[in-house]
Image (tube, rainbow, N blue to C red):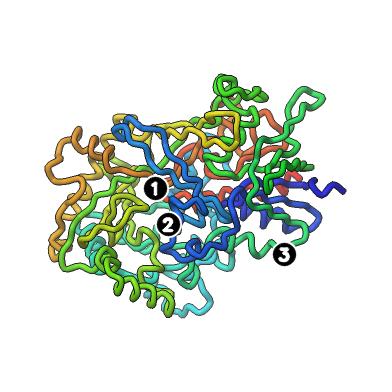
């Protein structure tokens, strides 16, 4: 037997790839290869929750992409973090557990013509791998009092005993409690659960952590499977291109991949399927380098066209957050706690002894979902509220006490692109999210800043005397606020849609509803790129749900 021959080759050991490796290798007769460009996830800052500050912008864990200058951002280019290690983006993200809204999945079902994507079937796939702390066996009959609902009702919506641990955060902040109260005073209801299908409300986010440590996809899905003799994991391995072969009927089939491992060229073949799980950026790059994509682009970059698929790299969507910073008084914030050696030492000691305190915290603790204007049927903006402030991730904290109320448009209408710049796999692609390119997105940006101001003006915040530092109260008109949004907004790293699924008669669909690449047998894409439209919230757990569903289809088709 050729040791470079496998049944399944999974490219990308990120959120989706780790789950797929677990599920596909469960059958001992199937040989599975998992390929990852990054290193193992044995870097300590991956596992300490606050370590995202040290992983983003770090070549050890991040691809270090930059976006193309954007007109909507007044010519700015943004840092565009993507995970580069086992676990992928789940090793560097904000750990927030969020499914989105039922309407997201109902829309996917309409777009694809496939009932499998409706909310109820997707709910079953979410639950299949969940391990929710509220359903732990140690819970008593006090569940309703503690958690705002009967245990049986909660279990209808959440899973227990799966690999994906969901816990409550291990610290609270007085100033964030006040923000939550102010949000209620501004008409946003309190909610104990953002994941029921309608996430309207304000509350503390639940997080993918276990006992104060980050719980990434590698620990959850890959490590339990790595002892299986039929699973091979190669790290520090890049894909040059997919191997395509013409079939007797003239159609194309993916039969393997050309890799570079430890500086050596390696060829691997797949008897059943090759599965691209390299993410909304990486999967596009690999497809285009392999001659699968918009013919005009490929010819212009010197890549022979194998399959003309104009949708590859189109339809990029992302959540752009507008970071309003408010100086506060009489408040404990991370800015002040971490601005001395003594403070940093105390924070470190608390985490070492108890796995609590600021080192255990996700980037955003408090969340809220509401409407940018009353005419909206569903919540269309999301808040990530943080007891800290800085100019940008990777920059130092401000020296004064402050909080950041970041707000993003959940359903942007702007669409961007991902395109290779050359035929070389070593060259990063051009990422152009095209933020704030539509009148609607600019209006939502202006309106959402006004919602932030309305919350901060409520009586609950008065004790902290909030003072708007960014963008600044002098900016009031739609035009001013939209321009300011362009000056201060940044991505929250949710790129999706670049290999979107759709009906057979949709010329821009890259994959069908079962995630098979159009015109290429034996090839699927299973990552956030397949989303036709972005989910109304953080995108990590929806990506796991997609992978859970895809694994069943792959096994059924074997």
**Is 374 above or below relative to 465?**
above
Label 1 close to label 2 by CB (< 8 Å): yes
Q: Which of disc 2 and disc 1 is earlier in sequence?
A: 2
Q: Which of disc 2 and disc 3 is earlier in sequence?
A: 2
Q: Which of disc 3 and disc 1 is earlier in sequence?
A: 3
* Extreme residue toward the front, this view: 263
Q: CA distance from mark 3 to mark 2?
A: 29 Å
Q: Quadrant of the C terminus?
A: top right
Secondary structure state at the residue bearing disc 2: loop
Residue 43 in the figure: left or right of residue 276: left
Residue 194 lies, in percent from the top left, at 39, 57
Q: Quadrant of residue 161?
A: bottom right
Secondary structure state at the residue bearing disc 3: loop
Q: Quadrant of residue 299?
A: top right
Q: Which mark is residue 492?
A: 1
Residue 280 in the figure: left or right of residue 179: right
Q: Which mark is residue 227?
A: 3
Is residue 117 in view from this perspective?
no
Q: CA distance from mark 1 to mark 3?
A: 35 Å
Residue at 68% of width from left, 43% of height from top?
Answer: 260
Residue at 79% of width from left, 42% of height from top?
Answer: 271
Residue 454 lies, in percent from the top left, at 18, 51
Tell me the crowding category of disc 3: few under 14, some 14 to 19, or many 20 or more residues within 10 angstroms, Cα based: few
Residue 330 lies, in percent from the top left, at 16, 68
Q: CA distance from mark 1 to mark 2?
A: 9 Å
Is residue 470 in view from this perspective?
yes
Label 2 sits on residue = 94
Tell me the crowding category of disc 1: few under 14, some 14 to 19, or many 20 or more residues within 10 angstroms, Cα based: some
Label 1 close to label 3 by CB (< 8 Å): no
Secondary structure state at the residue bearing disc 1: loop
**Is 236 above or below relative to 290?**
below
């Amino acid at each position: 037997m050729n040791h470079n021959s496998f049944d399944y080759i999974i490219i990308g050991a990120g959120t989706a790839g780790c789950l797929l490796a677990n599920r596909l290798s469960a059958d001992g007769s199937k040989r599975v290869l998992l390929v990852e460009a990054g290193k193992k996830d044995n870097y300590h800052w991956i596992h300490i929750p606050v370590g995202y500050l040290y992983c983003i912008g770090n070549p050890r864990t991040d691809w270090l992409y930059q976006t193309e200058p954007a007109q909507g951002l007044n010519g700015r280019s943004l840092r565009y973090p993507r995970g580069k290690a086992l676990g992928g983006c789940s090793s560097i993200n904000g750990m927030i557990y969020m499914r989105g809204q039922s309407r997201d999945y109902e829309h996917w079902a309409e777009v694809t013509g496939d009932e499998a994507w409706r909310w109820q079937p997707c709910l079953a796939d979410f639950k299949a791998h969940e391990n929710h702390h509220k359903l732990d066996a140690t819970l008593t009959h006090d569940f309703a009092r503690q958690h705002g609902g009967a245990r049986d009702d909660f279990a209808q919506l959440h899973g227990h005993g799966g690999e994906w641990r969901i816990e409550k955060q291990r610290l609270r902040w007085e100033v964030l409690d006040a923000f939550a109260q102010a949000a209620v005073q501004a008409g946003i209801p309190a909610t104990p659960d953002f994941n029921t299908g309608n996430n309207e409300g304000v509350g503390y986010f639940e997080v993918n952590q276990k006992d104060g440590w980050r719980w990434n996809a590698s620990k959850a899905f890959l490590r339990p499977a790595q002892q299986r003799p039929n699973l091979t994991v190669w790290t520090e391995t890049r894909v040059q291109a997919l191997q395509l072969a013409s079939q007797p009927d003239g159609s194309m089939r993916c039969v393997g991949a050309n890799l570079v491992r430890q500086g050596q060229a390696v060829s691997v073949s797949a008897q059943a399927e090759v599965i691209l799980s390299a993410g909304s950026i990486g999967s596009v790059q690999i497809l285009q380098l392999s001659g699968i994509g918009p013919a005009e682009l490929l010819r212009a970059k010197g890549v022979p066209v194998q399959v003309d698929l104009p949708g590859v790299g189109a339809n990029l969507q992302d959540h752009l957050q507008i970071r309003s910073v408010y100086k506060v008084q009489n408040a404990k914030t991370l800015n002040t706690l971490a601005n001395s050696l003594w403070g940093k030492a105390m924070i470190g000691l608390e985490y070492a002894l108890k796995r609590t305190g600021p080192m255990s915290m996700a980037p955003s603790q408090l969340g809220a979902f509401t409407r940018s204007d009353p005419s909206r049927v569903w919540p269309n903006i999301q808040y990530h509220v943080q007891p800290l402030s800085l100019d940008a991730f990777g920059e130092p904290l401000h020296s004064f006490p402050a909080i950041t109320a970041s707000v993003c448009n959940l359903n942007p209408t702007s669409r961007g692109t991902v395109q290779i710049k050359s035929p070389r796999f070593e060259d990063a692609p051009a990422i152009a999210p095209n933020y704030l390119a539509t009148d609607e997105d600019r209006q939502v940006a202006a309106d959402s800043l006004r919602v932030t101001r309305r919350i901060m003006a409520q009586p609950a915040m008065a004790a902290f005397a909030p003072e708007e530092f960014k963008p600044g109260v002098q900016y009031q008109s739609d035009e001013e606020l939209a321009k300011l949004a362009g000056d201060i907004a940044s991505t929250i790293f949710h790129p999706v849609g670049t290999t979107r699924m759709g009906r057979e008669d949709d010329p821009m669909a890259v994959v069908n509803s079962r995630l098979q690449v159009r015109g290429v047998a034996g090839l699927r894409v299973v990552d956030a790129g397949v989303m036709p439209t972005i989910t109304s919230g953080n995108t990590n757990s929806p990506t796991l749900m997609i992978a859970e569903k895809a694994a069943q289809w792959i096994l059924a088709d074997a």
